[in-house]
Every structure is written in C-alpha cells, then in structure tokens.
Image: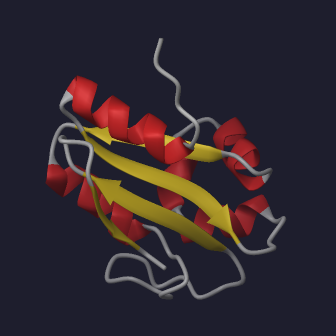
Amino acid sequence: MKTFSTHYDCIEELCRVHGKHGLLVSVAGDTDDWQEVEKAAPYLLDNDRDLSIKLLHGGFLILLFDTPEERDRHYFLTVGDDGPTKLNPYSGPATVFACTFGPDGRGITENT
C-alpha cells in the first residue's frame, strides 16, 4: 500500500510513474468569481467548466504534459502572486497558484 497525504505527493508520484512533466494548480486568495479565475488561468476555458468551479471551491488540479515547453506555456499563462506574466497580462483580483514538476517528480518552480 502507498499513501499520499498531500497533493504534492500525488503529483510527484504521477510525474515519476508516467514520466511526464507536471503542473499543480490551485486558487490562491479569497476570490469566489470563477470568471476572474479563468482570466488568471485561461487554459481552464479549454476544459469543462466544472474544473473551474471545483478549483474555486478548495480543490486543486494536476496537469500532466509530454514536454517541458507545453508545461511551461501553461505555467506562464497562470497569474499568481507574482502578478501578470509574459503570456498573461491579467491583473485582476484572482490569483492562481501554479507549481511545475519534472518527469522525475521533483518540484521546479512556483508563481508565489
């Protein structure tokens, strides 16, 4: 049996097992407006609207990618505490936490 006590444990294992690059995403701060969250992470619009709502209500999202370029594109679309990024000029009330992981399961960087 293997126990995962945090979402970090989960993404680390998923990246290692699948040999994928990962992005862990969660809503930071107090916003309860999913439209603002989607502006801070516009790739959420490409998915089912339920993802934004689940993310907004205390959840997190794990995204796995084949290439570091694809992962990094999503990372730089995500506006966190650091403010607007080179790919997303959004500067509204929502902030979305993002943390990147390599295929070895090790964390690389975060936008806080």
Which of the colour schemes (rainbow, by chain, secondary structure, one colour) is used? Answer: secondary structure
- Tell me if residue 87 comes above or below residue 68 in the rendering: below
The picture places residue 35, in percent across and down from the top left corner, at 73, 63
Q: Residue 7 versus residue 83: which sits nearer the camera? A: 7
Q: Residue 82 versus residue 37: which sits nearer the camera? A: 82
Name the residue located 15 percent from the left edge and 45 percent from the top edge: 67
The picture places residue 30, in percent across and down from the top left corner, at 81, 73
Q: Residue furthest front?
A: 1
Where residue 15 sits, quadrant-wise, is top left
Name the residue located 48 percent from the left edge and 11 percent from the top edge: 1
Lateral position of residue 8 relative to residue 72, left or right: right
Lateral position of residue 49 relative to residue 91, left or right: right
The picture places residue 71, in percent across and down from the top left corner, at 27, 53
The picture places residue 88, in percent across and down from the top left corner, at 43, 77
How many dots with numbers?
Answer: 0
- Tell me if residue 25 comes above or below residue 86 in the rendering: above
Name the residue located 35 percent from the left edge and 30 percent from the top edge: 14
Name the residue located 41 percent from the left edge and 40 percent from the top edge: 11
Q: Residue furthest top?
A: 1
